[in-house]
């Protein structure tokens, strides 16, 4: 009898295998890259796509509005008459307030190239402008879709040559492109900024850029036959126009609340200003976040803030790299880093110990964190915690949040993963406001399996703020 | 000094490169396992992405780099099980999904096997997938699941039994 099941299983899986084999490599590679990128950005256990709460929306809105309003109101930039960008002038609405690209075009660093791919099934793409340095590349391009079918963009792939399998695109890349509009019938202009996979000593003589698209109307599970790959070869001149930029070795460090923070791997290039934060090993606190890091260029009334590039930071080996805009029109002016404090916990307090069976917190950083009464009504395995934020402390919470690592250990030292809660949410929280402040209720899934108690969790962030302004001369 | 900084940057980059290469080597195997669980491309890619994300975050916790492949496979299977649990909770919504057209194209036999597999406990099912789909030995499965070989053998037998019981309930379709 067992033989029959085995044969049936083999037959069944053979058919599954045929279907699974149809997936094109490009989609698998994209999933891996996105996973790494997601992991790099994931400071909190709450997945970005699920943690949709009013507070987050407000914070994001502020992040977008404040820099925009600031740059619009900045008298230094406002006084500069816009320079003609030649044929790239048509990209002005796409570049909008992107200071790095705008100033590079003003300074003539971003080169006009206008190299087109052969037309494929009514679609052609042209790379119009390009700028590269040691850490990244910016591409202005046009998709000409002469069909009436909308295409979905998979992305850009950058290689030394077409035969080379190695993609030069970094995992911490970011895009200013509006992928929704990318493949619409007609002409679409796009801007994409991509971080190299590593610091590049030199560039190849030519760069192969491939744009991949597939018809939106097709089932995404369609075979690679439907994917259209349009490639162009861009010759790169290894001269100053492509390879400007400087490395800064900083001896000084920031000191906040007695904790030392150093910035290293600093690179100031046409595509942006890159720097990595490192924390001194002697620090007595675990630092989760630096509050409001910003760069300021210039002196006195000519000071201007260089905003962080939205979404552009990567965490490698637990160390975060920040990417700021650069003003390519002001290459000789001083730049300083300003921060407003840190969120941190004493190293002895970074663990949260809970007996989930007796519903008791055995160790927590403070009394603001309690077991929620709502846990009684939840199904087995769901841990519900309340965090109380006094009314005047709401800012602290918005700045740093509170998050647990996805991994926790039982009393025998065995590790476990937090599961999903609430219809696939990896983490879930609710806000309840009253006159005293706000109670945030967090839901975690520790699983239904009976585990040796207590369970030890680790904080990935906690809203303990040390507000103290500090600054550091970068250049 | 520039040289020193460059070296550090190279080390950072190497970490990412090596990780990417290690995952990429396994990509078809991982995707096919996910596909065998979820049977649609979008969810399988999502799970591959999620498993890569979890592995990337936790890569420092893997002490023995030679065990990367089984470790990553285990993470992926956990992600698949999470997704199946989520689907179960959303059973009503799932039923209303628009993949009716695809269902119609499947044979009765295949549908029965899918339904029977869905009824097998996750821990037994993962053994069936690794053994009959990926042709892995019991020792290899034990390494992936981080369980003793004896346990894996027991789970295999129990999985086959559950599968048999489930299919018998279908009216002895395959045995008649």
Image (spheres, rainbow, N blue to C red):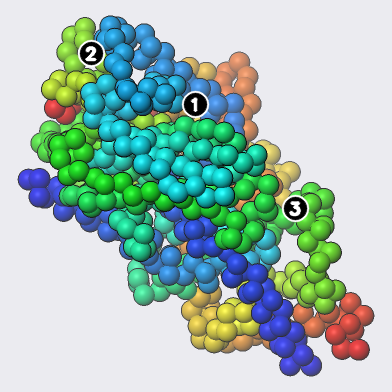
- Is A323 located above or below residue A213 in the figure? above
Report the residue at 55% width, 39% height from top: A145
Residue A150 on image: x %, y %: 62, 41
Q: Chain of mark 3?
A: B
Q: Is residue A474 left or right of residue B84?
A: left
What's the distance in space between the residues labelled 2 and 3, CA to CA? 55 Å
Residue position for label 2: A303
Q: Nearer the viewer, mark 3 or mark 1?
A: 1
| Residue A357 appears in view | no
Q: Chain of mark 2?
A: A
Q: Report helix, strand or loop for mark 1.
A: helix
| Residue A106 appears in view | yes
Report the residue at 28% width, 31% height from top: A110
Q: Report helix, strand or loop for mark 3.
A: helix
Residue A277 on image: x %, y %: 26, 39
Q: Nearer the viewer, mark 2 or mark 3?
A: 2
Quadrant position of the N terminus of chain A in the picture: bottom right
Q: Chain of mark 1?
A: A
Residue A78 on image: x %, y %: 31, 8
Residue position for label 3: B89
Q: Nearer the viewer, mark 1 or mark 2?
A: 2
Is disc 1 in contact with disc 2, using a CB cutoff of under 8 Å?
A: no
Report the residue at 23% width, 30% height from top: A109
What's the distance in space between the residues labelled 3 and 1, CA to CA? 31 Å
What's the distance in space between the residues labelled 1 and 2, CA to CA? 25 Å
- Is A271 located above or below residue B84 in the figure? above
Q: Report helix, strand or loop for mark 2.
A: loop
Quadrant position of the C terminus of chain A in the picture: top left
Q: Residues within 10 Å of mark 2 (few under 14, many from 20)?
A: some
Mark sitting earlier along the chain (1/2): 1
Residue position for label 1: A60
């Amino acid at each position: 009898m067992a033989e029959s099941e085995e044969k049936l299983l083999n037959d069944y899986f053979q058919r599954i295998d045929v279907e699974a084999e149809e997936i094109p490599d490009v989609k698998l590679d994209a999933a891996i890259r996105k996973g790494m990128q997601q992991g790099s950005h994931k400071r909190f256990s709450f997945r970005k796509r699920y943690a949709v709460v009013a507070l987050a929306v407000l914070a994001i809105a502020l992040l977008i509005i404040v820099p925009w309003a600031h740059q619009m109101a900045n008298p230094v930039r406002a006084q500069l008459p816009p320079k003609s960008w030649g044929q790239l002038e048509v990209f002005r609405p796409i570049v909008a307030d992107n200071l790095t690209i705008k100033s590079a075009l003003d300074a003539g660093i971003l080169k006009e190239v206008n190299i087109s791919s052969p037309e494929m099934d009514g679609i052609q793409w042209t790379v119009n402008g390009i700028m590269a340095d040691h850490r990244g590349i910016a591409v202005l391009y046009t998709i000409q879709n002469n069909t009436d079918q909308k295409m979905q963009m998979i992305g850009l792939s950058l290689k030394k040559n077409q035969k080379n399998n190695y993609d030069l695109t970094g995992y911490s890349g970011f895009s200013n492109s509006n992928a929704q509009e990318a493949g619409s019938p007609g002409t679409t202009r796009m801007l994409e900024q991509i971080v190299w996979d590593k610091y590049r000593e030199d560039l190849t003589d030519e760069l192969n850029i491939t744009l991949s698209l597939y018809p939106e109307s097709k089932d995404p599970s369609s075979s690679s036959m439907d994917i259209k790959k349009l490639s162009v070869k861009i010759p790169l001149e290894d001269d100053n126009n492509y390879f400007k930029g400087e490395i800064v070795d900083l001896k000084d460090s920031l000191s906040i609340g007695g904790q030392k923070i150093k910035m290293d791997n600093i690179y100031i290039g046409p595509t942006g200003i890159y720097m990595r934060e490192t924390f001194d090993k002697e620090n007595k606190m675990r630092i989760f976040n630096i509050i409001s890091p910003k760069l300021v260029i210039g002196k006195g009334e000519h000071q201007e803030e260089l905003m962080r590039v939205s979404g552009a930071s990567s965490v490698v080996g637990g160390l975060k790299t920040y990417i700021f805009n650069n003003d390519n029109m002001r290459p000789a002016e001083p730049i300083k880093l300003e921060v407003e404090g840190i969120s941190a916990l004493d190293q002895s307090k970074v663990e949260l110990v809970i007996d989930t069976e007796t519903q008791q917190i055995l160790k927590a950083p403070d009394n603001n964190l309690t077991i929620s009464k709502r846990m009684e009504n939840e199904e087995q395995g769901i841990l519900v915690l309340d965090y109380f934020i006094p009314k005047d402390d709401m800012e602290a919470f918005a700045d740093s949040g509170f998050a647990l690592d996805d991994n926790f250990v039982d009393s025998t030292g065995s590790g476990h993963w937090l599961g999903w809660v609430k219809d696939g949410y990896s983490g879930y929280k609710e806000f309840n406001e009253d006159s005293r402040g706000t109670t945030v209720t967090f839901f975690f899934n520790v699983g239904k399996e009976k585990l040796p108690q207590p369970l030890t969790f680790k904080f990935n962030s906690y809203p303990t703020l040390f507000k103290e302004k500090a600054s550091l001369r970068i250049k | 000094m520039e040289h020193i900084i460059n070296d550090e940057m190279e080390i950072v980059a190497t970490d990412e490169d090596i990780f990417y290469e290690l995952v990429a080597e396994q990509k078809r195997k991982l995707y096919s396992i996910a596909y065998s669980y979820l049977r649609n491309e979008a969810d399988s890619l999502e799970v591959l992405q999620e498993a890569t994300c979890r592995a990337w975050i936790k890569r420092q916790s893997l002490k023995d780099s030679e065990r990367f492949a089984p470790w990553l496979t285990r993470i992926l299977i956990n992600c698949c099980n999470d997704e199946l649990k989520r689907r179960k909770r959303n059973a009503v919504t799932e039923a209303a999904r628009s993949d009716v057209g695809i269902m119609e194209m499947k044979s009765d036999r295949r549908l029965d096997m899918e339904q029977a597999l869905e009824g097998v406990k996750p821990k037994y099912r993962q053994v069936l997938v690794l053994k009959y789909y990926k042709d892995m030995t019991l020792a290899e499965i034990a390494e992936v699941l981080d369980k003793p070989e004896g346990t894996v053998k027991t789970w295999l037998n129990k999985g086959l039994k559950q599968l048999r019981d489930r299919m018998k309930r279908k009216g002895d379709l395959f045995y008649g």
